[in-house]
Image (tube, rainbow, N blue to C red):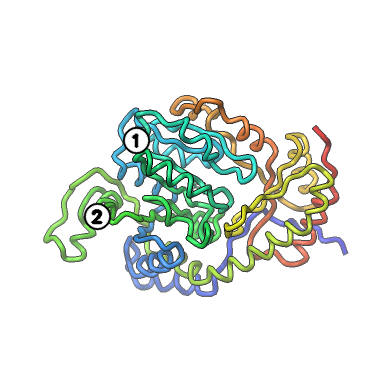
Amino acid sequence: MIDLSTIPFNHPHLAANELDYLAEAVRGGLTSGDGPFTRRATALLRELTGARQALLTTSCTHALEMSAILLGLRPGDEVVMPSFTFVSTANAYALRGAVPVFADCRPDTLNLDERLVEAALTERTRAIVVVHYAGVACAMETLCAIADRHGLALIEDNAHGLGGSHHGRPLGSFGRMAAQSFHVTKNAQCGEGGALLLNDDDLVAGAEIVREKGTDRSRFFRGQVDKYRWVEIGSSYLPSDVLAAQLTAQLEEFGTIQARRHRVWDAYHAGLADWADAHGVTRPTVPPGLAHPAHLYYLLMPCLGSRQGIIAHLAERGVRAAFHYQPLHTAPAGLRYGRTAEGGCPVTEDVADRLVRLPLFTGLTDSDITRVIEAVRSYTPRTP
Ligand SMILES: *Cc1c(COP(=O)(O)O)cnc(C)c1O
């Protein structure tokens, strides 16, 4: 029988306790930030990431904004980062008047090319922001050494990397700060949410203030001061405890979520190997020593035409595929607020045209997975 139902690109995982926890949070009435579920989710997150401290935020974008405030960035300061990433990586620093300096990515992992970073530094550089694309770690030995040598802060945009590791050490534990996302498209999700991981104890007090509208309200609630006041600039970056309840259920079930995602990833990787080799298609590279969290599965098609071709071909067969990212260095705001490192970003421009992502979520059944693989394999890419 032909299955004509559409396989969506993403569908959020529903954890066993999710609805009960949501009801409990609403009934309990402690629905503002930093309630009981926020404490539970934060503890789970610290366990998963090995981060010294973690603060839930309203999004990864906001966690990155907090990092920019905490670094004390000033107009004209420079932050080196990949062009091949989501807009928030750059926007968060541009909001503080800092200049994103876009460097190219490696052709294998699509991560910031560590060999290009030192050439992008100037006397205005204050930080390096890395993104572990698809949760496959950047070359952290080299990048940490560069940051140390030049006295720069290393920040991890770890939106893809929850559950990933680099030679046994969890992603999110390397940077002075790391930003997590719990957007509905991420491995653990609460619709919209995030966290700032802090691996430097000196940042914790300041981070609590920035997150609480620039006040020392967190210390007040702990009884450490007898009133709270406006002490720094900040904003409202703490999520409702209702969202934290949803996130708690997700993080408690993270092992199950990950096992199911890896099953899909591994099936695609094995099921498409010979087809990819025969048609000049590249599958993801995971260098030795790195554990990836099956955040996304992508293929690099031979050219833009075949990328658009396979998306249309899959759509006709009821399989929704997607592409991303549009390079930041050539985007309108990238041109206005950023600068491109010497040598440009030719690899970024190339892969942004050729990348296609396949459906990857916990609810995919065996027959769904087979349908996706067969739909891909029935496509013959045009050569460029
Ligand atoms: C999803 C994502 C973000 C933004 O996350 P939000 O929680 O939606 O703000 C930032 N950076 C990367 C690399 C992402 O994938």
Quick one: label 1, few (<14), some, or many (20+) residues within 10 Å? some
Of labels 2 and 1, earlier in sequence is 1
- For this view, does 10 lie left or right of residue 231? right
The percent coordinates of residue 214 (x first, y second) are 24, 48
The amino acid type found where label 1 is placed reads Arg
Note whether 345 is above or below 227 in the view shown: above
The percent coordinates of residue 215 (x first, y second) are 21, 51
Tag 2–tag 1 contact (CB < 8 Å): no
The residue beneath circle 2 is 205
Choose between 54 and 153: the one closer to the eye: 153
At a point 20% along the width and 54% down the height, the residue shown is 216
Choose between 307 and 229: the one closer to the eye: 307
Q: Which residue in the rendered view is the most extreme toward the right?
A: 1
The percent coordinates of residue 245 (x first, y second) are 43, 67
Q: Which one is in front in this view, the residue at disc 2 or the one at disc 1?
A: 2
The residue beneath circle 1 is 96
Choose between 186 and 83: the one closer to the eye: 83
At a point 38% along the width and 65% down the height, the residue shown is 42
- For this view, does 125 lie left or right of residue 132? left
Quarter occupied by the N terminus: bottom right
The span from disc 2 to disc 1 (Cα, nearest Å) is 20 Å
- Number of on-image labels: 2
The percent coordinates of residue 282 (x first, y second) are 73, 45
Note whether 151 is above or below 241 in the view shown: above
> Disc 1 on helix, strand or loop?
loop
Q: Which mark is residue 120?
A: none
> Disc 2 on helix, strand or loop?
helix
